[in-house]
Image: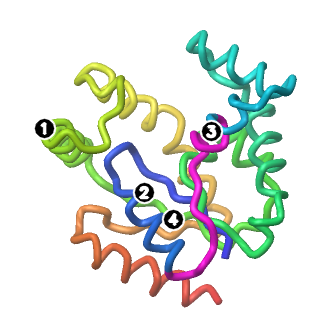
Amino acid sequence: MKIVLIGMQGAGKSTQGNLLRDHYQVPYLSSGHIFRNLAKEKTPLGRYIKELTSAGALIPDKKTTEIVQGYLERSEYSNGYILDGFPRTVPQAEDFRNGLTAAVYLNISDKEALWRIAGRIANGTEVRDDDTLPAIRRRIELFHEHTEAVIDYYRQKGLLEEIDGEQDVQEVFNEIIKRLEARQ
């Protein structure tokens, strides 16, 4: 099972990713995890990533795709994976060659995303350094500007499974499993 999870911040990607990991017995990882791990390595690539991210710059699409594909060639991903946070742009999706089973889009409204993130901030759980209202709104805008086109790309390829992410966690999970099982 090779799955990418798509959705704006607060959609429940990590929650569903971990449930899918346990169900399918394949690793769950985020692109952020990949880049953080590589940035720790004392290699030319690790230094390159660390320099870019420390400067607040984005890693170019081609380099991002090359890095993610290379990471997924590691033996622990040979039987599949659940990937969160990649691809974020159509060029990344077009260049990604990894035989996807499906792209699962957890669709939630902007209002629901803000509500969920505000709840995490109020509870002090899973809070990011940049979880300010302006930063959250900007990430939602970036999702609409760049990642919505990725959803259309996978829809046209027949790989998209769009799930109502505003349902209860278990209902979302059950719907994902039902859709993925229908693909096998």
Q: Residues within 10 Å of mark 1 (few under 14, many from 20)?
A: few
Pointer 4 residue: 104
Q: Is residue 5 left or right of residue 69?
A: left
Dot in front, 2 or 4: 2
What's the amino acid at mark 1? Ala
First-in-chain label (2 vs 3):
2
What's the amino acid at mark 2? Lys
What's the amino acid at mark 3? Thr
First-in-chain label (2 vs 1):
2
Question: Contact (CB < 8 A) between labels 2 and 1?
Answer: no
First-in-chain label (4 vs 3):
3
Local SS, label 4: strand
First-in-chain label (1 vs 3):
3
Please report the bounds of the magenta region as a residue range: 23-35
Q: How is the image coloured?
A: rainbow
- Where residue 12 sits in the image (x, y, percent)? 35, 57
**Quadrant of the rendered image containing residue 125:** top left
Image quarter (top left, top right, bottom left or bottom right) of the C terminus: bottom right
Local SS, label 3: loop
What's the amino acid at mark 4? Val
**What distance separates the C-alpha of mark 4 from that of mark 3?**
15 Å
**What distance separates the C-alpha of mark 4 from that of mark 1?**
28 Å
Pointer 2 residue: 13
- Give me the residue at 84% from left, 48% from top: 70
Pointer 1 residue: 122
Pointer 3 residue: 89
Dot in front, 2 or 3: 2
